[in-house]
Image (spheres, coloured by chain):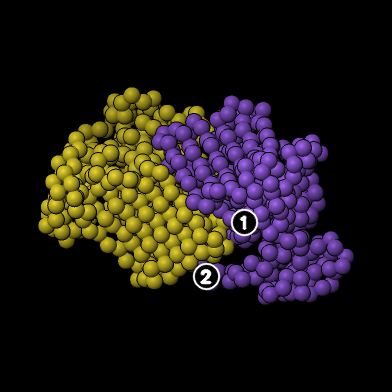
Chain colours: A yellow, B purple
């Protein structure tokens, strides 16, 4: 038995609760407490929030108090998607020597977009001798780590194509809503114009791959458009008529089109899968049958990353810097 | 442009020559000299041995002389499959601060089988502040690193199945010979009884996965048997009649059968592929269409590993410990 890591859960939204529940089942982890900004949760026993799990400690609203009281080794930060909003949470943790694994999408590879914030995180990590990484299934694995790792036995890479097709009908309700299922094309367009709509993390995935493969990241671009349903689709949460929006089609590529990332998430997708095509010497085509399951995967990879983060050099790291993240048998 | 690594090629067999040739094409590597035990090569210009490549320096038989004269950052050691015979080569390199990437099959994960030799390598690396890793396509990637890396987004792994089917007819002549193509079943059986026959590295791959997944490695076993050809197969090197041996079928598993590795290498294999099946939460099935090409891949992954080895902590490392090995665009 290796060392049991003391885990602090920061953020008790749906993903945070699920994360803590799954963490509690791991033989190498002990959930010792949680932090949430909701004053209604202050002082509650964590086991009353994360039901059906063996979790110790309680919920506090103060990060400083949590660190002092629960003495965590690692914090799981599942609060926000924006790096700027995650940094004030992560910096004091890192300074106090608490390693950070976060599902913050912008933390997956922020070195090009937010150099100043990266410096803050990196310095905090180095001063506290703690490492910090942003991970998840996407960004964090399918459209960034995986194409890079699969290129390991290639002598040269010329083109990278990574595709992910998700049947949103098999995912939770909020996700179906998030991808716009059931909207009219006009409503979808209005949401896009409004901003903040759609899947986060494309630029981060693309930047990680540009950095790994030494491709100029200048002029990287993204797109978002609706997948229009050709058929009627009913799920437990939405009812989509032909001609309505079934979900989103998003993507990103570098200026020369050498790296292309492509995601379709919609209700009624017939053949969900992840697919990586690497052109070079030799060519490699890899199919993940059915694709990685998003919700389970994001919690799982974060928990699996704990062991790797604790072995990484201090500071802000990416998934490519860490000792390989992998699961356990139990 | 990142730092250009000065590369010493140690061993000028077919793989070593191919390695140096491919290294010379890399913008981040400079081949500065070579070592080989063959006294006929002593003093030869390396470019006369590794033809058609921009390589500097010459060939010497003395490792110490090579280190002093060529001042390498990294040595590519492609000499032997046995760890015991590789250690006397690697220890002085590591002590002198030269990082080592080796195709020595037993170095892929020697921690359980050769703890004493591992200690020697590890201490030499730590004293010289250099890291050492054994890699290749198999062992090194398909049947060990890859199943572990693909498990990253899984909450639990219960069973691991890794299959590799190689069409030996598409590989070089020595490999077709190595797998026994064209032998009678009786000749094949005699070779097996004679020992030292077949593909090396199964135990190392299995031990890496046992270690990653926390499976008891006691009672791990391997098997080797012939693939009998149902048809006539002619290649440039062998002519196999129905009923003769087309190649080998080898495998390994832990005592409980939770991890099963399976390799078939034979002439006339219809659908070469690599396939990883991970049972757990969720299940994952990944197919590498056509499979990774062995010869290119072993050179490529070794060269790609250089950058990761230089960033690793000193001592003896495995592929799972390193920052992820990946290719470059160039």
Secondary structure beneath label 2? loop
Viewer-proximal residue, B125 or B1?
B1
**Which residue is tagged 1?**
B170
| x 72%, y 65%: residue | B17
Location of residue A76 in the rendering, given as x and y in whole percent from the top left corner:
39, 41
Label 1 packing within 10 angstroms: few (<14), some (14-19), many (20+): some
**Which residue is tagged 2?**
B330
Location of residue B99 in the rendering, given as x and y in whole percent from the top left corner:
68, 58
User: In screen coordinates, is A243 left or right of B33?
Assistant: left
Task: Provide the chain ID for the residue under circle 1.
Answer: B
Viewer-proximal residue, B187 or B76?
B187
Label 2 packing within 10 angstroms: few (<14), some (14-19), many (20+): some
Viewer-proximal residue, B9 or B233?
B233
Q: Quadrant of residue B63?
A: bottom right
Q: Quadrant of residue B102?
A: bottom right
Q: For the residues marked 2 and 1, what is the alpha-carbon distance in whole angstroms?
A: 27 Å
- How many callouts does the rendering have? 2
Q: Quadrant of residue A170?
A: top left
Task: Provide the chain ID for the residue under circle 2.
Answer: B
| x 66%, y 28%: residue | B218
In the rendered image, is residue A118 in sight? Answer: no
Say yes or no: labels 2 and 1 on the same chain: yes
| x 88%, y 65%: residue | B39
Secondary structure beneath label 1? helix
Asked if A70 appears above or below B291 in the picture, the reply is: above
| x 11%, y 57%: residue | A186
Location of residue B14 in the rendering, given as x and y in whole percent from the top left corner:
73, 61
Location of residue B167 in the rendering, given as x and y in whole percent from the top left corner:
60, 51
Closer to the eye: label 2 or 1 = 1
- CB of mark 2 within 8 Å of CB of mark 1? no
């Amino acid at each position: 038995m290796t060392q049991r890591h003391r885990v602090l859960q920061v953020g008790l939204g749906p993903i945070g609760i699920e994360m803590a529940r799954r963490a509690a089942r791991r033989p190498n982890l002990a959930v010792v407490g949680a932090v949430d900004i909701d004053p209604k949760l202050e002082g509650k026993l964590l086991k009353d929030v994360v039901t059906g799990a063996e979790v110790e400690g309680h919920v506090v609203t103060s990060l400083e108090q949590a660190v002092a009281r629960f003495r965590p080794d690692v914090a799981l930060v599942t609060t926000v998607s924006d790096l700027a909003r995650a940094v004030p949470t992560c910096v004091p943790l890192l300074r106090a020597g608490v390693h950070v694994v976060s599902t913050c999408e912008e933390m997956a590879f922020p070195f090009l977009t937010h150099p100043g914030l990266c410096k803050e995180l990196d310095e905090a990590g180095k001063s506290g001798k703690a490492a910090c990484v942003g991970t998840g299934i996407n960004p964090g694995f399918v459209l960034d780590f995986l194409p890079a790792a699969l290129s390991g036995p290639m002598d040269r890479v010329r083109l990278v194509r990574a595709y992910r097709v998700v049947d949103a009908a098999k995912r939770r309700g909020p996700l179906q809503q998030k991808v716009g299922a059931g909207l009219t094309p006009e409503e979808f367009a209005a949401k896009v114009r409004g901003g903040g709509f759609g899947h986060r993390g494309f630029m981060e995935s693309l930047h990680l791959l540009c950095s790994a493969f030494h491709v100029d990241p200048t002029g990287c671009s993204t797109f978002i458009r609706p997948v229009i349903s050709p058929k009627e689709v009913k799920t437990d949460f939405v009812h989509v008529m032909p001609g309505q929006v079934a979900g989103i089609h998003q993507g990103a590529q570098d200026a020369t089109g050498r790296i292309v990332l492509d995601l379709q998430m919609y209700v009624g997708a017939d053949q969900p899968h992840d697919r990586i095509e690497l052109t070079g010497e030799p060519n490699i085509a890899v199919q993940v049958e059915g694709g990685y399951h998003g919700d389970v995967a994001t919690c799982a990879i974060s928990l699996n990353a704990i062991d790797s983060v604790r072995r990484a050099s201090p500071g802000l790291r990416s998934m490519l810097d860490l000792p390989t993240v992998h699961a356990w048998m139990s």
